Image (cartoon, grey):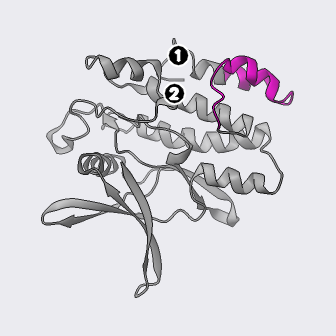
Amino acid sequence: RARFFCDETKDVFREVAIKVGDKEALQREFEAHQLLGVQSHIVIPPTSHLKDGELFCLEYELAQHGDLYKYLETFQGGVRQLTAMQATSIFLQVVTGVANAHSLEGKGSIIHRDLKPGNILVFEGENGRPEFRVTDFGISHSTRKTPSVSSITKEPFRGGTPDYWSPQQKAGILNPDINPDKRDDVYSLGKIWYQLLANKFEDIWSDLEGQLNKISPEIPKEIKELVMQCVDEDRTEDM
């Protein structure tokens, strides 16, 4: 749907990430960032570029360490695995970004709807520590009804990544009366947390609870329970 590539702007000595792709998705993403502004653990709002009066691409700050997939591949290249506490520390940064999008003061909520490791970018933070930020609001949905953000408040853009769809998202593909809500993101977050704890991203979706108990004895019972609450079909919006 869209792709990133590096643009070395040598005259000003900087590298940026340029995103091109579906115009509707780019417009939704740009409008979402207009509402979000600068938020902790969400990528810095992009600069828009027009061609013939229409949105052509978005320019972002370049993520030095790629996405979460790449980061964990590099981490595990040293034959190391994340401990439960390291995995949860990364997860809490991601949750902070999503929580900020869900609770915009006076602006309603923005539901991301496509949370996955590939949409979590890794930047160089303070003291060289990695900083994890949420990106790609191309199919996001805003609960705020205002003409100034028309693209992200109209009929939900159907799409996303099936492995991370919530049950409501799956049902919404066939039933347009089912609107996005925060539970979609909560469900996806639970799967990401599970993968961080498991230190792998391949197809491990069956019997999550059983597999979680086998991963490592060091994972506290409270963490296991929270993961399972996130992926429970009866989960709440404000976990």
Q: Position of residue 72 (x, y in %)?
A: 69, 50
Q: Is residue 207 magenta?
A: yes
Which stretch is magenta? Answer: 202-226
Q: Nearer the viewer, residue 110 or 199?
A: 199
Q: Position of residue 8 (x, y in %)?
A: 44, 78
Q: Which mark is residue 141?
A: none
- Helix, strand or loop at label 2? It is helix
Residue in the image at 63% along x and 54% along y: 70
Image side of residue 71 versus residue 168, left or right: right
Circle 1: is it few (<14), some (14-19), or many (20+) Cα within 10 Å?
A: some
**Looking at the image, is 8 positioned above or below residue 158?**
below
Residue, disc 2: 186
Q: Nearer the viewer, residue 139 or 162?
A: 162
Q: Amino acid at mark 1?
A: Arg
In the rendered structure, which disc, 2 or 1, sits on the residue that comes first in sequence? Answer: 2
Q: Residue furthest bottom?
A: 11
Q: Nearer the viewer, residue 206 or 149?
A: 206
Residue in the image at 80% along x and 29% along y: 215
Image side of residue 43 versus residue 230, left or right: left
Tell me how many marks there are. 2
Query: In which quarter of the view is residue 117 placed?
Result: top right
Q: Residue furthest right?
A: 217
Query: In which quarter of the view is residue 10 placed?
Result: bottom left
**Looking at the image, is 156 positioned above or below residue 44?**
above
Residue in the image at 56% along x and 38% along y: 95
Q: Position of residue 208 (x, y in %)?
A: 67, 21
Q: Which mark is residue 235?
A: 1
Mark 2 and mark 1 residues within 8 Å of each other at the beta carbon:
yes
Q: Amino acid at mark 2?
A: Val
